């Protein structure tokens, strides 16, 4: 649990959060989410048992949708405590947005658990659609309003361009996480689905080629994120601007956290605070071709010229 | 498909819809939903294969979340056509609400498919939480805004009292559907989970006792719906009032549709339009005890005195 550095992680997403109670509640959810992921999703007895996972996900989600709900699994009661905190300081709209994002996350994990159970390696398009949900970015970014107190109006939050920016931020962060955990997964002989195993299978690539193709895909998405962001920001209201800053903090913060967090390093190694303190950033994106990305129709709409 | 009488069904939910294109698009989704339910959920090869169902649900949902998405299953392309219609006439907020409701429905079906696969009979509390999603009421009621053009502000739509009213309307309609299809299910020796088999197992009841207990539960929820509705309506804005009328039309319309629709009658019998034209309504609810309902903590919040 400690090794997830969840407080470090989420504080990087919401450096502007001024209210300790709000930031604490959001951070507690991140701890909860990593713990649930490890105990009930990625690993653990349910990781290849979709029937049981679907039922647990339903019980877990119910405490987001309804106060007073209960469940036998200890993760249900812990989550209820956290969501009750959200209800104590946030309007129903922001709590509901979090609840919907939470359901989206669990639906992606259910998809992943099903793939693991049936030994199915998804194609790139399916993997991206699944990973956009299973990565947990939807609830994590929904925490931004809860942590900062921003209340983005509906007509701004659901603007297709803002939805596209949210999805792009999630995919960039998820691709970075896939990269951070690659060494650990290889050393454990994991054959799980991740961006690289998917690209290797779909495009008949070596691991090294897949790493390069994954970085190229990630950079093309980030470039489109920056381009579209700069078109959206000038007309955004104050609370949407807070949210958009959160997306950008999140992309960078997730990356800096991921390079140092014991969770993604090989087992037994616990870096001290100064280790990896010098991070290097590439001076150029490794792929500057405009999108849409080939073979991924489910995200082609991010490059729709009509988005603004 | 024809036997679902989907146009009859949804026209009863939205008698105030004035725009034919809107009403047509909403009705097409109802046809799609019943067809998908029969071919891919309740029956068909995926009804007990949660791994495969989770993957298909993910692909299906992606066309609600993202324009241009594609999928191999013919139901994916058909749904995309329908959602593109919604996008052509409705603001992004209303389309997004429908998409979220659609995901909620699929998550409930995934729970149900998992229970069928593992032979698990849920307890009453779990069954209600699952049925609130799997019944399809969330997307059906989300169609109200799309069909009528109402645009309920966030702060009204996500008021806990309005959410409680939506959930109560869904449970009443789902209980009515369980009752309508009971004879058909018994005649086919279905042992599937429904309100009565759940009550029989949880409370050691005979079928006749379970039918009475189910009707009592349904009436208690409907009474609370009416009581809370009358507290919410006086301060509701015009579009919320349209939505609330839709909930009430839906409860009655689902019931009148369900008593006549060939889908719920025994196989081979196709009633003519005048058959069952005389419906009898009880003059009193069969149970007038105040809630919350015993053994169902997940819906206890509907009776929270703080709701208004």
Image (tube, coloured by chain):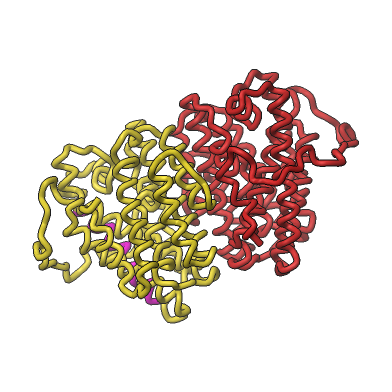
Chain colours: A yellow, B red
The answer to whether residue B259 shows anywhere in this view is yes
Q: Nearer the viewer, residue A19 or B110?
A: A19
Q: Is residue A178 magenta?
A: no
Q: Is residue A215 magenta?
A: yes
Q: Main secondary structure of the magenta part?
A: helix
* Residue B19 image position (x, y, % from top left): 75, 60
In which quarter of the view is residue B231 placed?
bottom right
In which quarter of the view is residue A290 placed?
bottom left
Q: Nearer the viewer, residue B44 or B85?
A: B44
Q: Nearer the viewer, residue A61 or B59?
A: A61
Classify residue A260 as left or right of residue A225. Answer: left
Task: Write down the region rendered in magenta.
Answer: A212-231
* Residue B304 image position (x, y, % from top left): 62, 54
In which quarter of the view is residue A53 placed?
top left
* Residue B126 image position (x, y, % from top left): 54, 37
Q: Nearer the viewer, residue A56 or B269?
A: A56
User: Residue at coordinates 77% horizontally, 44% vertically from top-left?
Assistant: B8
């Amino acid at each position: 649990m400690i090794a997830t550095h969840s407080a470090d992680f989420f504080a990087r997403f919401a450096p502007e959060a001024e209210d300790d109670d709000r930031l604490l509640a959001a951070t507690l959810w991140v701890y909860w989410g990593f713990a649930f992921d490890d105990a009930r999703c990625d690993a653990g007895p349910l990781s290849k048992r979709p029937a049981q996972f679907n039922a647990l996900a339903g019980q877990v989600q119910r405490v987001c949708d309804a106060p007073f709900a209960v469940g036998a699994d200890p993760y249900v009661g812990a989550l209820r405590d956290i969501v009750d905190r959200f209800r104590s300081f946030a309007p129903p709209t922001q709590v509901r947005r979090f609840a919907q994002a939470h359901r989206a996350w669990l639906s992606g994990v259910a998809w992943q658990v099903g793939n693991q159970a049936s030994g199915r390696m998804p194609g790139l398009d399916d993997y991206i659609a699944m990973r956009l949900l299973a990565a947990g970015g939807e609830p994590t970014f929904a925490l931004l309003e809860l942590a900062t107190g921003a209340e983005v109006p509906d007509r701004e939050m659901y603007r297709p361009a803002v939805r596209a920016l949210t999805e792009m931020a999630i995919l960039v962060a998820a691709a970075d996480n896939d990269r951070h955990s690659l060494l650990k997964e290889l050393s454990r002989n994991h054959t799980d689905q991740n961006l690289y195993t998917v690209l290797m299978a779909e495009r008949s690539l070596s691991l090294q080629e897949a790493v390069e193709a994954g970085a190229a895909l990630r950079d093309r998405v980030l470039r489109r994120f920056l381009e579209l962001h700069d078109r959206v920001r000038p007309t955004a209201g104050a609370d949407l601007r807070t949210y958009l800053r959160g997306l950008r903090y999140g992309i960078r913060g997730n990356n800096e956290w991921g390079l140092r967090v014991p969770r993604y390093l090989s087992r037994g190694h616990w870096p001290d605070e100064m280790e990896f303190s010098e991070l290097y950033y590439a001076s150029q994106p490794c792929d500057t071709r405009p999108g849409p990305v080939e073979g991924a129709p489910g995200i082609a709409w991010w490059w729709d010229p009509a988005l603004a």
